[in-house]
Image (tube, rainbow, N blue to C red):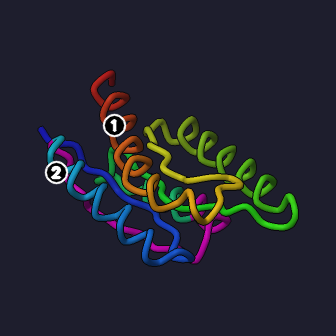
Amino acid sequence: MPKNIAIVIGSFHQKEANEMLDEVRNFAKQNGLNIVEEAWVPGSMEKPLALKRVLSDSRVDGAVVLGIIEKGETKHGLVMAQAVVSAIIGLQLELMKPVGVGILGPEILPDQIPSRVRPYARNAVKALVKVMKDD
């Protein structure tokens, strides 16, 4: 039976987010995954709440989280990334559902983003598929 997944994605970098989403949709389909929800959020800090909501849905077997945390002038991105990833790990353990993380950064430079958008999205699905097969 195919597995159902959700996608949580930040809209702050809309063009790149759409590319990531396209890649996840294609790769999920190739791997027999059904996408039952796509949850858009403004940025990275909102991802854990949206992730908890989608993972709490009984139809959802796992999720992919996508986004970009660029290098800024301060360490805000590092702190934010640590908080977000820690929350994602906690939700996986709490809800016992796997999550593939495709968040570029922290501290990625704008010129590094284009070449990494699709590979990061694809790798998030690959990780999710691998963990779901091990269930």
User: Can you name the residue that lies furthest to the right here?
Assistant: 74
* Place of residue 63 in the rendered image (x, y in percent of width and height, measured from the top left): 40, 50
Q: Residue at x 59, y 47 (%)?
A: 88
Figure quadrant of the C terminus: top left
Would residue 4 be found to the left or right of residue 14 on screen?
A: left
Q: Secondary structure at mark 1?
A: helix
Residue with the mark numbered 2: 29
Figure quadrant of the N terminus: top left
What segment is highlighted magenta in the picture?
A: 32-49
Vertical relation: 14 (above or below) 102: below
Three-letter amino acid code at disc 2? Lys
* Place of residue 16 in the rendered image (x, y in percent of width and height, measured from the top left): 44, 69
Vertical relation: 102 (above or below) 93: below
- Observer-nearest residue: 105 or 38? 105
Residue with the mark numbered 1: 126
Q: Secondary structure at mark 2?
A: helix
Three-letter amino acid code at disc 1? Lys
Q: Residue at x 53, y 56 (%)?
A: 52
